[in-house]
Amino acid sequence: MSDILTHDSGLAGHDASATADNFFTGSIITGAGSHDPYVSGYAFILWLKVPAWLSNGEEFKAFSQKNFKAFGGLNDIDMEVAGITGGFTSNQHMYATKLGDKPSEFTLRYQAHSGSPLQRYYDEWVSGVRDPKTGIANYPAEFGLEYHSDNHTGTLLYVVTRPDANNFGGNNIEHASLWTHVMPKRISMGHFNFEQGNVEVNDLEQPFAGDMHFGQNVSQFAQKYVNGKIYPFVSENEFSNINVYTG
Protein backbone atom coordinates (compact mmCIF):
# COMPACT_ATOMS: atom_id res chain seq x y z
CA MET A 1 0.00 0.00 0.00
CA SER A 2 2.81 2.40 0.84
CA ASP A 3 4.34 1.78 -2.59
CA ILE A 4 1.05 2.74 -4.27
CA LEU A 5 0.77 5.95 -2.28
CA THR A 6 4.34 6.84 -3.20
CA HIS A 7 3.99 6.38 -6.96
CA ASP A 8 0.37 7.31 -7.66
CA SER A 9 0.75 11.05 -8.08
CA GLY A 10 -2.98 11.51 -7.76
CA LEU A 11 -2.67 10.51 -4.10
CA ALA A 12 0.68 12.05 -3.23
CA GLY A 13 2.80 14.99 -4.35
CA HIS A 14 5.60 14.59 -6.86
CA ASP A 15 8.50 16.44 -8.39
CA ALA A 16 7.18 18.53 -11.31
CA SER A 17 10.56 18.54 -13.04
CA ALA A 18 10.62 16.71 -16.38
CA THR A 19 13.86 15.03 -15.29
CA ALA A 20 12.26 13.44 -12.23
CA ASP A 21 11.79 9.67 -12.23
CA ASN A 22 8.08 10.02 -11.57
CA PHE A 23 7.33 12.67 -14.24
CA PHE A 24 6.19 9.94 -16.64
CA THR A 25 4.73 6.82 -15.05
CA GLY A 26 2.69 5.46 -17.96
CA SER A 27 -0.44 7.32 -16.87
CA ILE A 28 -1.77 10.85 -16.39
CA ILE A 29 0.15 12.81 -13.78
CA THR A 30 -2.11 14.58 -11.28
CA GLY A 31 -1.75 16.11 -7.85
CA ALA A 32 0.26 19.05 -6.54
CA GLY A 33 2.90 20.26 -8.94
CA SER A 34 1.41 18.55 -12.01
CA HIS A 35 0.72 20.42 -15.25
CA ASP A 36 -2.93 21.14 -16.01
CA PRO A 37 -3.97 21.12 -19.68
CA TYR A 38 -4.41 24.44 -21.44
CA VAL A 39 -8.12 25.40 -21.48
CA SER A 40 -9.17 27.90 -24.13
CA GLY A 41 -12.12 30.27 -24.09
CA TYR A 42 -10.96 33.03 -21.70
CA ALA A 43 -9.59 36.24 -23.21
CA PHE A 44 -9.83 40.02 -22.98
CA ILE A 45 -8.95 43.06 -25.05
CA LEU A 46 -7.97 46.42 -23.59
CA TRP A 47 -7.56 49.59 -25.61
CA LEU A 48 -4.56 51.46 -24.23
CA LYS A 49 -4.85 54.26 -26.80
CA VAL A 50 -7.32 55.39 -29.45
CA PRO A 51 -7.31 58.59 -31.57
CA ALA A 52 -8.04 61.65 -29.47
CA TRP A 53 -10.47 62.96 -32.09
CA LEU A 54 -12.97 60.12 -31.77
CA SER A 55 -16.23 61.66 -30.53
CA ASN A 56 -16.28 59.61 -27.32
CA GLY A 57 -13.17 57.51 -27.00
CA GLU A 58 -13.93 56.22 -23.51
CA GLU A 59 -17.34 54.94 -24.54
CA PHE A 60 -15.84 53.30 -27.62
CA LYS A 61 -13.14 51.56 -25.58
CA ALA A 62 -15.58 50.29 -22.96
CA PHE A 63 -18.19 49.04 -25.42
CA SER A 64 -15.60 47.45 -27.70
CA GLN A 65 -13.96 45.62 -24.79
CA LYS A 66 -17.23 44.35 -23.35
CA ASN A 67 -18.89 43.47 -26.66
CA PHE A 68 -16.01 41.53 -28.19
CA LYS A 69 -16.85 37.92 -29.06
CA ALA A 70 -13.76 36.67 -30.89
CA PHE A 71 -10.18 37.63 -31.69
CA GLY A 72 -8.52 36.24 -34.82
CA GLY A 73 -5.21 36.79 -36.55
CA LEU A 74 -2.55 35.06 -34.50
CA ASN A 75 -0.63 32.51 -36.51
CA ASP A 76 2.36 30.26 -35.95
CA ILE A 77 5.78 31.68 -36.82
CA ASP A 78 7.80 29.01 -38.60
CA MET A 79 11.54 28.86 -39.05
CA GLU A 80 12.54 28.56 -42.69
CA VAL A 81 15.45 26.30 -43.56
CA ALA A 82 17.54 25.46 -46.62
CA GLY A 83 19.27 22.20 -47.37
CA ILE A 84 22.70 21.51 -48.83
CA THR A 85 24.07 18.26 -50.15
CA GLY A 86 27.56 16.81 -50.47
CA GLY A 87 29.35 13.60 -51.38
CA PHE A 88 27.73 10.85 -53.42
CA THR A 89 24.17 11.02 -51.99
CA SER A 90 21.33 13.50 -52.09
CA ASN A 91 20.97 13.53 -48.32
CA GLN A 92 20.33 17.07 -47.17
CA HIS A 93 21.72 18.92 -44.19
CA MET A 94 19.36 21.65 -43.04
CA TYR A 95 20.45 25.13 -41.97
CA ALA A 96 18.34 27.97 -40.65
CA THR A 97 17.70 30.78 -43.12
CA LYS A 98 15.05 33.10 -41.72
CA LEU A 99 12.04 33.24 -39.42
CA GLY A 100 8.55 33.72 -40.80
CA ASP A 101 6.73 37.02 -40.50
CA LYS A 102 4.87 38.07 -37.39
CA PRO A 103 1.14 38.74 -37.76
CA SER A 104 0.34 42.22 -39.08
CA GLU A 105 -3.47 42.05 -39.09
CA PHE A 106 -6.19 40.87 -36.72
CA THR A 107 -9.97 40.84 -36.52
CA LEU A 108 -12.46 41.45 -33.74
CA ARG A 109 -15.93 39.93 -33.94
CA TYR A 110 -18.77 41.65 -32.12
CA GLN A 111 -22.53 41.59 -31.81
CA ALA A 112 -24.29 44.07 -34.10
CA HIS A 113 -26.81 46.12 -32.14
CA SER A 114 -29.72 48.29 -33.22
CA GLY A 115 -28.58 51.86 -33.66
CA SER A 116 -24.98 50.78 -34.43
CA PRO A 117 -23.55 51.94 -31.07
CA LEU A 118 -20.15 50.39 -31.76
CA GLN A 119 -20.07 50.37 -35.53
CA ARG A 120 -20.49 54.15 -35.73
CA TYR A 121 -17.15 54.61 -33.97
CA TYR A 122 -15.42 52.35 -36.46
CA ASP A 123 -17.11 54.29 -39.28
CA GLU A 124 -15.94 57.56 -37.75
CA TRP A 125 -12.38 56.28 -37.31
CA VAL A 126 -12.04 54.96 -40.87
CA SER A 127 -13.75 58.00 -42.44
CA GLY A 128 -11.52 60.37 -40.51
CA VAL A 129 -8.41 58.73 -41.91
CA ARG A 130 -9.81 58.51 -45.47
CA ASP A 131 -13.08 60.24 -46.31
CA PRO A 132 -15.19 57.95 -48.54
CA LYS A 133 -16.12 60.82 -50.91
CA THR A 134 -12.93 62.84 -51.22
CA GLY A 135 -10.30 60.28 -50.23
CA ILE A 136 -8.57 62.75 -47.93
CA ALA A 137 -7.92 62.72 -44.18
CA ASN A 138 -10.46 65.06 -42.56
CA TYR A 139 -9.34 64.99 -38.93
CA PRO A 140 -6.26 67.28 -39.21
CA ALA A 141 -8.23 70.32 -40.41
CA GLU A 142 -11.30 69.57 -38.29
CA PHE A 143 -9.43 69.11 -35.01
CA GLY A 144 -6.26 71.13 -35.56
CA LEU A 145 -3.95 68.13 -35.52
CA GLU A 146 -0.95 67.18 -37.60
CA TYR A 147 -1.53 64.47 -40.14
CA HIS A 148 0.59 61.71 -38.64
CA SER A 149 0.01 58.01 -38.07
CA ASP A 150 0.36 58.47 -34.31
CA ASN A 151 -2.72 60.71 -34.41
CA HIS A 152 -4.93 58.17 -36.17
CA THR A 153 -3.77 54.82 -34.80
CA GLY A 154 -4.34 53.06 -31.50
CA THR A 155 -2.78 50.52 -29.14
CA LEU A 156 -4.52 47.30 -28.10
CA LEU A 157 -3.56 44.76 -25.45
CA TYR A 158 -4.83 41.20 -25.97
CA VAL A 159 -4.59 38.72 -23.09
CA VAL A 160 -5.59 35.06 -22.81
CA THR A 161 -6.08 33.74 -19.29
CA ARG A 162 -6.67 30.55 -17.38
CA PRO A 163 -10.27 29.84 -16.27
CA ASP A 164 -9.58 31.95 -13.13
CA ALA A 165 -10.19 34.88 -15.46
CA ASN A 166 -10.39 37.63 -12.82
CA ASN A 167 -7.35 36.45 -10.83
CA PHE A 168 -4.75 38.77 -12.33
CA GLY A 169 -2.90 38.92 -9.05
CA GLY A 170 -2.29 35.18 -9.42
CA ASN A 171 -0.22 35.15 -12.61
CA ASN A 172 -3.11 33.74 -14.65
CA ILE A 173 -2.12 35.05 -18.11
CA GLU A 174 -1.49 32.35 -20.71
CA HIS A 175 -0.64 34.73 -23.57
CA ALA A 176 -0.26 38.47 -24.00
CA SER A 177 0.34 40.44 -27.16
CA LEU A 178 0.55 44.19 -27.57
CA TRP A 179 -0.66 45.61 -30.86
CA THR A 180 0.58 49.08 -31.82
CA HIS A 181 -0.04 51.24 -34.90
CA VAL A 182 -3.60 49.83 -35.00
CA MET A 183 -6.15 51.00 -37.58
CA PRO A 184 -9.61 49.61 -38.43
CA LYS A 185 -9.98 48.74 -42.11
CA ARG A 186 -13.71 48.52 -42.78
CA ILE A 187 -16.92 50.52 -42.86
CA SER A 188 -19.50 47.76 -42.44
CA MET A 189 -22.70 48.06 -44.49
CA GLY A 190 -23.31 44.59 -45.93
CA HIS A 191 -25.49 43.49 -43.02
CA PHE A 192 -28.06 46.16 -43.99
CA ASN A 193 -28.91 44.36 -47.23
CA PHE A 194 -32.45 43.00 -47.44
CA GLU A 195 -33.87 39.65 -48.50
CA GLN A 196 -37.55 38.88 -48.06
CA GLY A 197 -38.14 36.31 -45.35
CA ASN A 198 -34.58 36.51 -44.03
CA VAL A 199 -34.81 37.67 -40.41
CA GLU A 200 -31.77 37.19 -38.20
CA VAL A 201 -29.36 38.79 -35.74
CA ASN A 202 -25.84 39.50 -36.92
CA ASP A 203 -22.26 39.27 -35.77
CA LEU A 204 -19.87 41.67 -37.46
CA GLU A 205 -16.12 41.36 -37.95
CA GLN A 206 -13.84 44.38 -37.88
CA PRO A 207 -10.44 43.84 -39.52
CA PHE A 208 -7.45 45.83 -38.27
CA ALA A 209 -3.88 46.44 -39.34
CA GLY A 210 -1.26 46.64 -36.60
CA ASP A 211 2.18 45.66 -35.35
CA MET A 212 2.21 42.70 -32.95
CA HIS A 213 4.66 42.51 -30.05
CA PHE A 214 5.03 39.61 -27.64
CA GLY A 215 7.53 38.11 -25.23
CA GLN A 216 8.52 38.23 -21.58
CA ASN A 217 8.42 42.01 -21.23
CA VAL A 218 4.96 42.22 -22.80
CA SER A 219 3.68 39.47 -20.49
CA GLN A 220 5.11 41.21 -17.42
CA PHE A 221 3.59 44.51 -18.52
CA ALA A 222 0.21 42.86 -19.09
CA GLN A 223 0.26 41.19 -15.67
CA LYS A 224 0.76 44.55 -13.97
CA TYR A 225 -1.44 46.64 -16.24
CA VAL A 226 -4.53 44.44 -16.40
CA ASN A 227 -4.85 43.93 -12.66
CA GLY A 228 -7.69 46.20 -11.53
CA LYS A 229 -8.66 47.29 -15.06
CA ILE A 230 -10.89 44.37 -16.08
CA TYR A 231 -14.54 44.93 -15.26
CA PRO A 232 -15.77 43.11 -12.13
CA PHE A 233 -17.51 39.77 -12.36
CA VAL A 234 -20.78 39.19 -10.50
CA SER A 235 -20.93 35.58 -9.35
CA GLU A 236 -24.12 33.53 -9.09
CA ASN A 237 -24.24 33.87 -5.30
CA GLU A 238 -23.72 37.63 -5.33
CA PHE A 239 -26.37 38.79 -7.84
CA SER A 240 -25.51 42.32 -6.76
CA ASN A 241 -27.64 43.96 -9.47
CA ILE A 242 -30.92 42.53 -8.19
CA ASN A 243 -32.34 46.06 -7.88
CA VAL A 244 -32.36 46.32 -11.67
CA TYR A 245 -35.08 43.67 -11.78
CA THR A 246 -37.19 44.88 -8.86
CA GLY A 247 -37.83 48.45 -9.96
Image (cartoon, grey):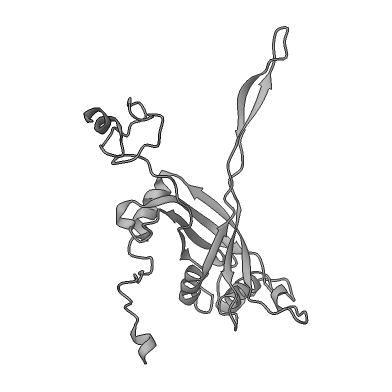
124 lies above or below 106: below
247 lies above or below 8: below
At 47% from the left and 77% from the top, the residue drawn is 59
At 39% from the left and 52% from the top, the residue drawn is 173
Furthest residue in direction front, as rendered: 1
Residue 246 image point, x, y percent: 36, 90
Q: Quadrant of residue 18?
A: top left
Q: Quadrant of the C terminus?
A: bottom left
Q: Is residue 204 left or right of residue 235?
A: right
Q: Is residue 17 left or right of residue 199?
A: left
Q: Quadrant of residue 96?
A: top right
Q: Quadrant of residue 111?
A: bottom right
Q: Is residue 206 left or right of residue 5?
A: right
Residue 169 image point, x, y percent: 30, 56
Q: Is residue 151 left or right of residue 217?
A: right
At 55% from the left and 72% from the top, the residue drawn is 145
Residue 161 image point, x, y percent: 42, 54
At 73% from the left and 14% from the top, the residue drawn is 90
Q: Quadrant of the N terminus?
A: top left
45 lies above or below 238: above
Furthest residue in direction right, as rendered: 196
Residue 212 image point, x, y percent: 53, 51
52 lies above or below 13: below
Q: Nearer the viewer, residue 166 or 179?
A: 166
Q: Count of labels shown? A: 0
Furthest residue in direction bottom, as rendered: 247
Furthest residue in direction left, as rendered: 2
Q: Nearer the viewer, residue 126 or 79?
A: 79
Q: Nearer the viewer, residue 155 or 26?
A: 26
